[in-house]
Image (cartoon, coloured by chain):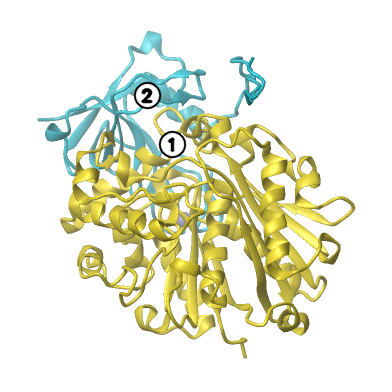
Amino acid sequence: MKNTELLTIRSGDTGMPYEWSIGKYGSRFFREIREHQRFLGIRCPGCGKVRVPPRRLCGPCFRELDELVELSDTGIITAFSVVNYPFIDPDTGLQRPIPYTYGYIRIDGSDNIFSHIINETDESRIKVGMKVRAVFRKPEEMEGNIRDIRYFEIIR
Amino acid sequence: MARRVAIVGTGQTHHKSHRLDVNGREMIHEAVTRALEDCELTINDVDAIVIGNMDHFESINCVDTWSVEGSGGVMKPILKVSTGGTTGTSVAIAAYYHVASGLFDRVLAIGWEKNSESDTTGAIITCSDPIWDRFSYSGAIPSLATEASAYMKQYGATQKDAARVAVRDRTHALNNPYAQMYNRPISIEDVMESAMLAYPIKLLDVCPRSDGACAVVFAAEEIAGKISPRPAWFKSCAARHTTTWFGDVDYDTGLLSLQRAAREAFDKAGIRSPADDLDVAELYLPYSYAGLKWIEALGFCGPGEGPRFIWDGNTDMGGKIPMNPSGGVISTNCIGATALLRVAEAALQVMGKGGKRQVPDVKNALATGFGGCWWSDVVVLSKDRPS
Ligand SMILES: [Zn+2]
């Protein structure tokens, strides 16, 4: 240590584990994926919108929802980005592997967009408006979380 | 009826990527001292403090109590307000509420951040929903990049259009010795050739990570004129915070929260044509494409007209409505301070204290904040005391 050196203290790399409640409709969503390999949305009787994943509350209408809607496993890319720079993933405490493409997909039959990974990292081969299909884990490997959807692939 | 309120003093640090010579408290103290010197008050004159940052960035919770030696909050009422990227405008608006209520005469608003102390992207990801969004959400840059991809598809805007915005802000930073990117001008070619971080955003399209703090003194109408010969009157403000589901955003309608906040704040301030009635704008534009799309939400031009408006020079110094004389967020981004810096810089313009970055004859100035899941704050300051 030099006389003039300005020091910092490192926190260490261990994280504190949390356990978040998914809720009843979110739990149904993951069961639907395991049993039928398709998505489940929910319709708001106030604004008429079908949103996925299904949630119990509509924010704009401020009301409770209960009308689940079966959807398919396909959709349209509405926005995307190919991520090329490294950062720490707070879920794992490790650097998230790059490059990967993160995007928003309008699941067929829904009115909002769904955030996930698209398995195409070549910018010249992916465009807003392309049709995609979800690729799921094998049912016996599913854990009831967002990773049960492996990624979306472009239907060419 | 709310009391009229004015900004009478501002202070900020010289922003850097790493301030290893100070801890957070000491850095806050620099900004607070400069703000008090600016209006010739002492900490004893301050009745209450509102402070904010992104507390998960430094992993120091309860920063309101942790920072009192630096903020001057010992034995004073102090509140923490933390709303993500909009924290800076939220502390300004909260300080305004304090004084406008009639309960406090002189209130200090503080925003700060030591971005060097953690992985900014990793920290931002913890703002997203842990069950649904966190797996794919990738922090600010890729999230904004998805917005850019949709805007380019909708209106045919190009990467070069966006580069023009980055060049403007970095050129303006030539006039601001406080900016992290002071004296580091760039060209369109530099932007186009810089590393692709997250398509279509390149390194020079985005803000840096900064260590810095900002402090602003608010005073009641009865005393503002005695403290400052030319205060910046707080004419109006509005905040619009939407839901936190990233998937519920409709990219094709423009930035809805900013449209709504601007409409309310402009109505209250009597701003009918923003490009004509405002003289300068300090906008929270964390990336270049926002300088195209979000100025449409503010009504400076119509949907899809952002690129033309920028290329025509309207937003340069000397243009119809100069934007970001300070160099903006692309030149400095200490996140919890960033939106308060917009308010402070707008106040400097109204008070005629802009130095080399001063726009001549400013009557009305706009400041905005942006954050989190696409939410927005708008503040209008004026040379004229509100009627
Ligand atoms: Zn609804």
Q: Quadrant of residue B292?
A: bottom left
Residue B51 showing in the rendered view: yes
Closer to us: mark 1 or mark 2? 1
The percent position of residue B66, horizontal first and vertical second, equals 78, 40
Q: Quadrant of the N terminus of chain A?
A: top right
The percent position of residue A5, horizontal first and vertical second, equals 62, 23
Specify whether B349 is left or right of B275. right
Output the letter for the chain in yellow.
B
| Total numbered labels placed on residues in the image | 2
Output the letter for the chain in cyan.
A
**Image mark for residue A102:** none
Question: In this view of the protein, which residue sits in the foreground, A155 or A104?
Answer: A104
Label 1 neighbourhood size at 10 Å, few (<14), some (14-19), many (20+)?
many
Specify whether B98 is left or right of B239. right
Disc 1 marks a residue whose amino acid type is: Gly
The percent position of residue A41, horizontal first and vertical second, equals 39, 40
Disc 2 marks a residue whose amino acid type is: Ile
Q: Mark 1 lies on which chain?
A: B
Which residue is the site of mark 1?
Answer: B139
